[in-house]
Image (tube, grey):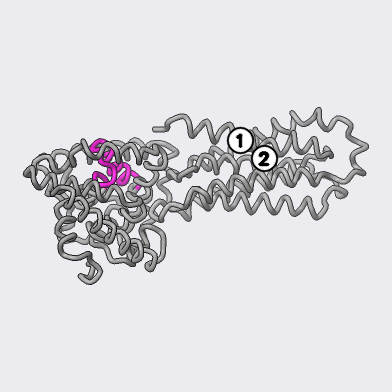
Amino acid sequence: MTSASNRPDAGLGERLRELDAPESPENGELMDEMFADVTEQCDESDRTIRGFLRGRSTVARRLIILTVFAVLAAIGWYQFPLISEQGRTVSWATSLVAFCILLLTAMLMITRPVHLPALPRWQSVCLVCIAIGATIVAALWPLPAAQAATHDHGSAMAGACMGVGLLLGVPVYALLRLMDRGNALGSLVAAAAAGLAGNFVLKAHCSIPGTSHELLGHASVALVFVLGLGLVHRWIPSK
Amino acid sequence: MPNSPLSSAATDEELMDAYVDGDQAAFRSLFERYGPVLLRLTRRHLRDDELAREIVQQTFFRLHGARNDFRRGSKLRPWVMTIAMNLVREHWRRTKRRKMTTLEVDTQAAPEADFLPIELRQRSELLHVALEKLPTSQREVVELHWFQERPYAEVAKIVGTSEGAVRVRAHRAYTTLKQLLASQIRGDE
């Protein structure tokens, strides 16, 4: 209970109390109606995969996401050829680590428990901007020129890389949205995470060199996701 | 729905524990305890009956979704209040209707005050107008500290800031409210 010394003086206190008006007589009925709606909504939600996943504890939700990411990464790493030894430079490794860290941060933001004060929106906006910025910076660190001779059609192949990146990002976006209990700007952060995941895979496996190829085919993935999925999702009123 | 086997003397936390263990009647008891409190809170903030009800329902829907995050020994009230305040804030951000509502205030009676005597309703209206003029961050603190009678430490936890910042906000809010009310009364006379 609040101590008296913390309270405003009696005059103001009395007026504030007036605002706390007594319940109207029909309130009991109203509460019953409201409760019926809530239980219906909860039951309906529990029957869906989304409701089931969102109903898991925060630790469980994070473990599920990490497991899915780890499985996807392992399959990609061992099933598809990485870029040649020549291309595995410090900047290449730095880009991959940066994408991982940003992806992890996005995951933590999206799975933030709802009983904690919501994060300020600028933090989400910052993460989205940093994610897009990181993909652009990574594109400006292309593969060594020595490899360029083997690929003449870098720009032409950009469309193919973009398609692959978008395709790979969709399951990441879907998974994060399924786990999101309703964070502000969650769709935008999930879109940025999907773009990062796409970029991670492209950076690890695509051996086509050239800044223009990476800008058009790789970095554009994050931008398309954020502008497309994120903003469209925001504009379409959700249930 | 049958009443919870837990007695009415059961604490909120005991009810929540029972609900986490699958006791649906405990959820009903929690709704009966917190529903009216949250409805008053959201009505004061939103000045829209329909919307207030929606936010209360959403609060319980989110509480249902987050039930597995509830740890034994935690306090339930800050949980519920934080969820509700997050939803109210999110509503303002999404609709950006803050200014519009402020303009509506003069013509819209407080929903819960319809059956009150005219004089009391007018006084309540003046106070509503004064509260509306406070910044959201200060109004939240008045709401939680005065109306919900929460100590500063708990208010700080709910709004996600330090106790010192909450004290400063409360002091400023009460000072502003006193000034606004004094000027309103002078204006009335």
Compute the Cα span from label 1 to label 2.
Answer: 10 Å
Q: Image quadrant of residue A16?
A: bottom left
Q: Residue at x 48, y 34 (%)?
A: A234
Q: Residue furthest left?
A: B117
Residue at image mark 1: A225
Quick one: label 1, few (<14), some, or many (20+) residues within 10 Å?
many
If the image is split into quadrants, where does the N terminus of chain B sit?
A: top left
- The relative height of residue B145 versus residue A152 in the rendered view (above or below) is below
Q: Specify the amino acid type for callout 2.
A: Gly
Magenta stretch encompasses residue B59: yes
Q: Specify the amino acid type for callout 1.
A: Phe
User: In the rendering, at what x and y percent does residue B185 appear?
Assistant: 16, 52
- Mark seen at residue A198: 2
Circles 1 and 2, Cβ within 8 Å, touching? The answer is yes
Q: Is residue A65 left or right of residue A160?
A: left
Q: Residue at x 22, y 64 (%)?
A: A8
Q: Is residue A76 left or right of residue B119?
A: right
Q: Residue at x 36, y 65 (%)?
A: B168
